[in-house]
Structures are given as C-alpha cells and as structure tokens.
Amino acid sequence: MTSVLVVEDDDAIRAAVRRGLSDRGYAVAVAATGMAGLEHVIAEQPQTVLLDLGLPDVSGLTLISMIRAASAVPIIVITAQDDDPTMVKALDAGADDYVVKPFGTDQVAARIRAVLRRGGRSSDPSEPIRVGELVIDERARTASLAGDPLDLARKEFDLLLALANRAGEVVTKRELLSEVWQQAYGGADRTVDVHLSWLRRKLGETAAQPRYLISVRGVGVRLVDPGAEQAGAEGDA
Ligand code: CA
C-alpha cells in the first residue's frame, strides 16, 4: 500500500483528498500545518507528499526546502495559483509536480503514480543508468552513447549524471548549479548554459535540434530517451 501524506489546512479539501485517496487504496495521513507535516515526513517517511502552498504557519515554498533537506520523498504541490512564477519557484525549491485547485482525485492519483514511477529508477550507483542509447556508469565515471565512449570533462559528467538521475523530469538551473557546482543561483549565471552546450556538442546534438537534452524555456532542462519521446510516451498536456 502506497503511503501518502496530505499537508493542507483547508478542512474540506483535506477530508476530500483523504477520502478519495483512501478509496483508491492509498494509506493516507494528514497534517493541517506545515510543521506537523514536516514532523510526519521525518518520523514516518511517507512515499509521497501532497503539499498545499498556502499554509498558516510556514510558506509552502519554505516547507518544500525543509522537507528536501530531510528527505528525497516526491512532493506534489497543491496550489490555487495557476501562474508560472509560482510553479517555477515550487519546482526550483524541490517539488516534483503540482496540481491546481480545484482538482479531482483521479488526477491526484495519476500524478502520484507518475512521481513514484519516476522515483523507481535504481539509485544503486553500481548499476549503470540507461537512457535510450546513453549509458552512464557512476562508479567508473564513464559514459557512452550507442556504445561509443564519451570524452567528458569532470563537470560535464557530473551534469549528465545529475540529469540522468532524474531522467524525464525537468531539472532547474538552480538545482543543477547547487548539485553540480555547489553554488547558489545568481540569476545571471551562465555556468549551467555553457556546460549544457558543451555536453550537447559531445552528444552530437544542438539546442535547435535536441535529442537527449530538452530545454524547457525559463525553467530548466530534462534528459529524455529520444526513442520514447518520438513514440509519444509523454502523455502530459
Ligand atoms: Ca491553504
């Protein structure tokens, strides 16, 4: 049974989500405040967190960062604000996906399945990560494309690995700068862009005609399996 924590201060929404997900076979826990939610994440380690951005005690964005400091649990943000800056901030802070109020339980359940699928990749570093014809061996620090070894500089490899660990997901430049360079994002920083363009060249593709590295304007980049993309595997509108 998949365990889900719902952090939501609105009694009616919290009860409805709890009932809807319980009916669909999830083990649902609820918290009405951010701090209660954080305590639950640390103590109970749920498999997914649904998180309202407008909480009484702490901002949802702050709470995402606090949960991220303690756990890699997938976070799906519940937001009333259907505007891009809020989504970008939530994704930057470490959220994995979002639903916009009002939403149906079927949509929430589908998003939970999706984040769990994405999180189901092997995190065992002894096992190479495969994305299409790309093979990335974290332990040996080698990568190959269609069997041909890639000659990657240290940071290029780190960047590729960071993207491969979350293949299919949009990874923000802020996250990449933090994970790969251990630097805070300054907004005007070109480090990520420059290394992405070098990595692109080594993968034999261009920004205009990408195959593996798909830029998401204003948000970040995702590493995809071009074969699966062409087959229309991405169902999300
Ligand atoms: Ca709220």
Image (cartoon, rainbow, N blue to C red):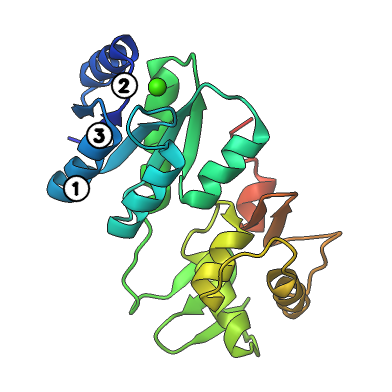
Residue type of the residue flagged with mark 1:
Gln
Pointer 2 residue:
9
Q: Residues within 10 Å of mark 2 (few under 14, many from 20)?
A: many
Q: Is residue 131 visible?
A: no
Residue furthest to the left in view is 43
Q: Is residue 112 visible?
A: yes
> Disc 3 to disc 2, how far (Cα)?
16 Å
Residue type of the residue flagged with mark 3:
Val
* Residue at image point 73% right, 61% down: 211
Pointer 3 residue:
4
* Residue at image point 59% right, 52% down: 170
Q: What is the secondary structure assignment of the residue under circle 2? A: loop
> Disc 1 to disc 3, how far (Cα)?
9 Å
Q: Is residue 169 above or below residue 152?
A: above
Residue type of the residue flagged with mark 2:
Asp
Which quarter of the figure is the N terminus placed in? top left
Question: For residue 200, what is the image quadrant?
Answer: bottom right
> Which badge, 1 or 3, is on the more N-terminal residue?
3
Pointer 1 residue:
45
> Which badge, 2 or 1, is on the more N-terminal residue?
2
Q: Is residue 191 above or below residue 226?
A: below
Locate residue 175 relative to residue 53 in the image: left or right.
Answer: right
